[in-house]
Image (spheres, rainbow, N blue to C red):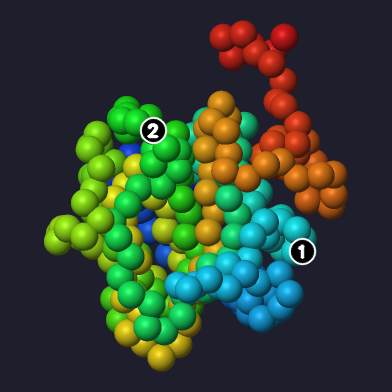
Amino acid sequence: MTLSEPTTSLVAAVQKQGFAIWPGFLQGERCDEIRRLTEHLAGGKHANHYPKSTRVWDLYRHGAEFVDLLVDPELTAVLNELLGENHLVSDYSLNVVQPGQPVDGWHIDYPYNEMPAPVTGAVLGLQCVLALDSFCSSNGATQLVPESHTRTDRPDADAVIDHVVFDGEPGALLIMTAATWHRSGFNASTAPRSAVLMSFVERWVRPMSDPPEPGPWGRTDALRILLGMQRPPETINGVAI
């Protein structure tokens, strides 16, 4: 799929400043349905309750709507541009932050956080945050340090750093490189803040999650490759062998 002008701008922004916001990535009934499904999951048997949040892992297991989200054509085109074709899902989860959650520490994400010395010059991994509630300063929306993905040092978790905030309505998508310095703010509101988290890595990077067993989530070659269930065709210098 050829990138449209808006998605071309998104790719350029991610490459330059380490992140970009895609307003209205999900809209209308599609957004409402994902919100309804995640609300049910957060109160069900698959929810894992931690001190700072509630998580539901491996969302592809919980309905075709979540599988479809993984292979959204426009999102796939952006990911192909940033990570290359045959990239892999590293993590796919629901994250519900409760009122009163404190400020998180500044950090970077996988795979950079596993490296003895983070490298620059390639994206390697992306974190996509799909807002299911409004994200703003008052409810502790994600804070980001522009152009920090070009640095090779690690952030001081407690440092005071100039930053921007992911402001977005439900359906907005934050796309950031895994090397971008970021954290969650303090949720000073009286309501939870929910998001779907989709992490992706280049095809040669081992994902955080193991490949799943056969199931409805592997209905196509593209999905099986994305979930690590099937290897893509081998190539030499980009030519299939």
Mark carried by residue 115: 2
Give the residue displayed 75% in from the left and 36% down from the top: 229
Vertical placement of residue 86 versus 155, above or below: above
Q: Amino acid at mark 1?
A: Gly
Q: Position of residue 189 (x, y in %)?
A: 36, 87
Q: Is residue 85 visible?
A: no
Q: Position of residue 63 (x, y in %)?
A: 77, 64
Q: Secondary structure under badge 2?
A: loop
Q: Which residue is mark 1?
A: 63
- Please tell me which residue lies in front, 11 or 40: 40
Give the residue displayed 31% in from the left and 30% down from the top: 117
Nearer to us of marks 2 and 1 is 2
Q: Position of residue 184 (x, y in %)?
A: 35, 66
The quadrant of the picture occupied by the N terminus is top right
Quarter where residue 182 is shown:
bottom left
- Please tell me which residue lies in front, 134 or 94: 94
Left or right for 210, reference 16 = right
- Please tell me which residue lies in front, 74 or 18: 18
Q: Amino acid at mark 2?
A: Met
